[in-house]
Every structure is written in structure tokens, then in C-alpha cells.
Amino acid sequence: MGIGAYRHLVTLTHPTAVIDPPGWWCSLQNSGAQVMEGQVAYVLRGRYHPGLRLETRIAFEDRTLQVQSVADTDERHTELTVMAVEVVGRGRHLED
């Protein structure tokens, strides 16, 4: 299916906590920014999910993303904006 502005079902995991529900519907877009050499930044947007915090991993297709920041984490907000990165090999670029 690939990355794009339409909605994706991703799987959330946490190293020390059970995330319920483990799935999250969000838009997933390449931000166009390279955070560091070998790391590409992504922007995810979706309705509030209590499991999203810095330790959260996001699995989508064959990618695993690490959350870098979460905006609007207050439950009163209906939308979350999440910045995440995927570590890729030196000099390798992802095709979206």
C-alpha cells in the first residue's frame, strides 16, 4: 500500500507496557526531512490514542518507526501529531 496521506492501520508496541488497543488509524507521510544520516522523519496524524509516547514503536508493513515527539497528548484533543523516525542503512533511501 505504501506511505501517503490516506489512512493506514499501524501497530503500536511498547517495551514495558501493553498497549490496548494495539492498532491505530493514522495518516503516515514522509516529512521530507532527514533527521540524521540514515534516519528519515515521518509525520503521523490520527485521533487520540493513550499508548502514544516516546517509548512507543510503530510497525507498518516492513518498517518500524520510533516516536520522537507527540504533540497534543492531552485526552481532550481529538487529533495527535506524531514525529517518528526509521533507521535505515547508510546511503539507502526508502521508496514511498
Image (cartoon, rainbow, N blue to C red):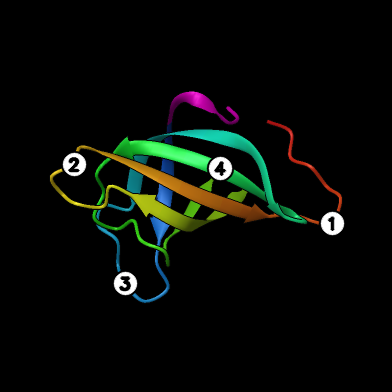
Mark 4 surroundings within 10 Å by alpha-carbon count, few (fewer than 14), some (14 through 19), many (20 or more): many
Instruction: From the image, state whether disc 3 or disc 4 is nearer to you.
Output: 4
Q: Give the residue at mark 4.
A: 42
- Quadrant (top left, top right, bottom left, bottom right) of the N terminus: top right
Task: Give SS at disc 3.
Answer: loop
For this orientation, the residue located farthest to the left is 76
Magenta range is 1-7
User: Is residue 50 or residue 82 the one in the foreground?
Assistant: 82
Residue 31 drawn at (x, y percent): 59, 36
Q: Residues within 10 Å of mark 2 (few under 14, many from 20)?
A: few
The picture places residue 32, in percent across and down from the top left corner, at 65, 35
Q: How many angstroms separate mark 3 from mark 4 (CA)?
A: 24 Å
Whether pointer 2 and pointer 3 mark residues with C-beta atoms closer than 8 Å, the reply is: no
Name which residue lies at 49% across and 35% down: 28
Residue 4, image x, y percentages: 54, 26
Residue ID at (49%, 58%): 68
> How many other residues sit within 10 Å of disc 3, few (<14), some (14-19) or many (≥20)?
few
Q: Which residue is mark 1?
A: 90
> Residue 14 appears in which quarter of the rendering?
bottom left
Q: Nearer the viewer, mark 2 or mark 1?
A: 2
List the residue tagged with mark 2: 77
Residue position for label 3: 17
